[in-house]
Image (cartoon, rainbow, N blue to C red):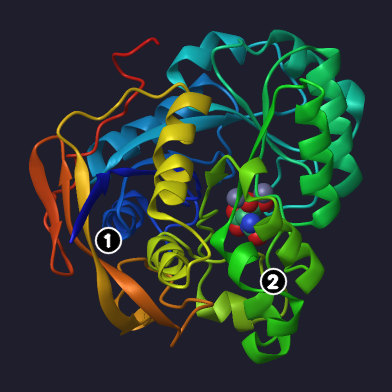
Amino acid sequence: MIKLPGLIDPHVHMREPGGEHKEDWQSGTRAALAGGFTLVLAMPNTKPPVVDSASFNAVLKLAESKALCDFALFAGAGPDAANLPALAERTAGLKMYLDQTYGPLRLDEMDLWMPHFASWPLNRPLAIHAESRTLAAAVLFAALFDRPVHICHVSKREEILVIKAARERGIPVTCEVTPHHLFLTQEDIPRMGGGFAEVRPVLASRADQQALWDNLDVIDCFASDHAPHTMEEKKGENPPPGFPGLETSLPLLLTAVANRMLTIDDIVQRCYTNPLRIFNLPAQPDTWIEVDTKAKWEIRAAAMQSRCSWTPFEGYPVQGRLERVVLRGKEVFRDGKVLAQPGYGRNIRERSQG
Ligand code: NCD
Ligand code: ZN
Ligand code: ZN
């Protein structure tokens, strides 16, 4: 049994409001605790999206009454940047969607990016969905505006190499990689079946996957990009992109430790130390998780807390099991059971203005 800090997931989609049939603040934060995450940063592509103080306050109210784990909310960058900076202190950061994604928050023209880069405060990160050449443009913007950017869900060799080169030249770029891009490739698509394999960024080639493992030192964070959609939606006509990930991330990463592809310290750096620094988060007092690194089991969606009730890793043999979670001095998960009550989760931006 080993003890680790409460993990931080800097990229989750809670779906409430507007997508409660996929997930809501209660089911999503139950899934977080059952996955070893005591703090989640929630994305703004809800219905309606979080793009101003009215929509931000509405989601905050829901989250405060329902969340079981701690959280902060991203604001989303829309075409109008004027009123967002006033909200910044209360947010996890600003999310910018610059490529194809789920939801309405895509900014195509670079002239729409500029006011956000110019006016968003430096103590709150810019988290960016940008792939391939768009990612190179986002890196250029980090240099032009001389401000840190965090690149979400990096999946390709060309992307990790551009980030590496940018950092070697002192451009302030950090990045995250999802477990699904570390453990799945496009070769898994036939087995997964059409809509169930749909995700953005798409599952990449073996060479892309290998480049992520070869450049582990360039990867600052592991992020689940927990993006639940129901089985009916994934089976249907226009399957929305996204995988649930909160409850499979830690067991997959621990399995990589058992297989000597990662160390426990690699996990702690990327699921705690680096997200804490990059997103300027307060440490959670008296908070930790306990893990049995020897336990072998199989991933089963039926045993999960997420409402979406499927996983791309169904039946995967894993080694390493979460046994216990303590959040701010209270036992909130033990032996497969979530013990916290809705409303126990705190908005970590509430008091700290750090
Ligand atoms: C995400 C979603 O469903 O909200 N989908 C996905 O495939 N990753 C959107 C996103 O993270 O771009
Ligand atoms: Zn994205
Ligand atoms: Zn996402």
In this picture, residue 59 sits left or right of residue 102: left
The answer, for residue 205, to whether it is visible in the render is no
Q: What's under tag 1, amino acid-wise?
A: Ala
* Residue at image point 27% right, 69% down: 321
Give the answer, above or below, for where 158 lies relative to 50.
Answer: below
* Residue at image point 67% right, 88% down: 193
- Any mark on residue 200, and which? none
> Mark 1 or mark 2: which comes first in sequence?
1
Disc 1 vs disc 2: which is toward the camera? 1
Identity of the residue furthest to the front in this view? 260
Q: Which residue in the structure is indicated by mark 1?
A: 34
Q: Quadrant of the N terminus?
A: bottom left
- Any mark on residue 198, and which? 2
In this picture, residue 227 sits left or right of residue 348: right
Where in the figure is residue 192, as x and y percent of width and height? Answer: 63, 86
Residue 21: quarter of image: bottom left
Q: Decide if ligand 1 comes within 8 Å of the CB at mark 2.
A: yes
Where in the figure is residue 160, as x and y percent of width and height? Answer: 77, 47
